[in-house]
Image: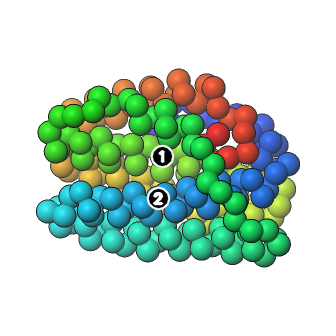
Amino acid sequence: MLGLKLPTDPRWVNIVEKNIEEILTDHAFCEQKAASTAISFIVLFPEHTELVQEMTALVKEEISHFKMVHDKIIERGWTLGRDRKDEYVNRLMTFFPKGGSRTTFLVHKLLYAALIEARSCERFRLLSEEIADKELATFYRNLMVSEANHYTMFLSFARKYGETEMVNKKWNALLEFEAEIMKDLGKKETIHG
Ligand SMILES: [Fe+2]
Ligand SMILES: [Fe+2]
């Protein structure tokens, strides 16, 4: 349903379970970055009214997710640590060449966002199904639903602002590239690691 070409090895959850503080820290920053990305769409593309409306709602939702994760960190007696390097996102975002028209830039940015939401959703689903901590299992189940909606929204915006056939071609190529990146990952206690 998410179109991902390579599923995460469920053993990734065994790695995560050994260090809940680490996964929650990384996750908190993923939510914070999702909120920042939504703001960046508003700053860069103010003329797209529908996008601005949806991104305004998204900022609130993502920052509320950040608070939910932050609350979990506090409940467990921890303090939020520094941001972790996201090798997955850094590598993913090298795929499309820089430059091109404003519309091209918008489409690429929307496709990256759609894919990051899709992979996060897949990771949350795995956590909700496999993690032994029941409280976290429910937590991740609820978040999975939100991120699936975000994935659909970003992809529909890409198809709305770009030429559909071209967007579909780019989306498929990006999915192939992402699967290659994922072959090297799934070994760290981070959301995309
Ligand atoms: Fe989120
Ligand atoms: Fe999201």
Q: Do the residues labelled 1 and 2 touch (CB within 8 Å)?
A: yes
Q: Is residue 109 visible?
A: yes
Q: Is residue 144 visible?
A: no
In the image, taking residue 148 as reference, residue 55 lies left or right, namely left
Residue at image coords 48%, 50%: 117
Image quadrant where residue 109 sits: top left
Q: Nearer the viewer, mark 1 or mark 2?
A: 2
Distance of mark 1 from mark 2, alpha carbons? 9 Å
Residue 116: numbered disc: 1
In the image, taking residue 113 as reference, residue 72 lies left or right, namely right
**Of helix, strand and loop, which one carries label 2?**
helix
Indicate yes or no: mark 2 CB to ligand 2 under 8 Å. Answer: yes
Task: Tell me: residue 66, above or below residue 162.
Answer: below
Mark 2 neighbour density, 10 Å: few (under 14) some (14–19) many (20 or more):
many
Amino acid type for the residue under numbered disc 1? Ile
**Circle 2 residue:** 34
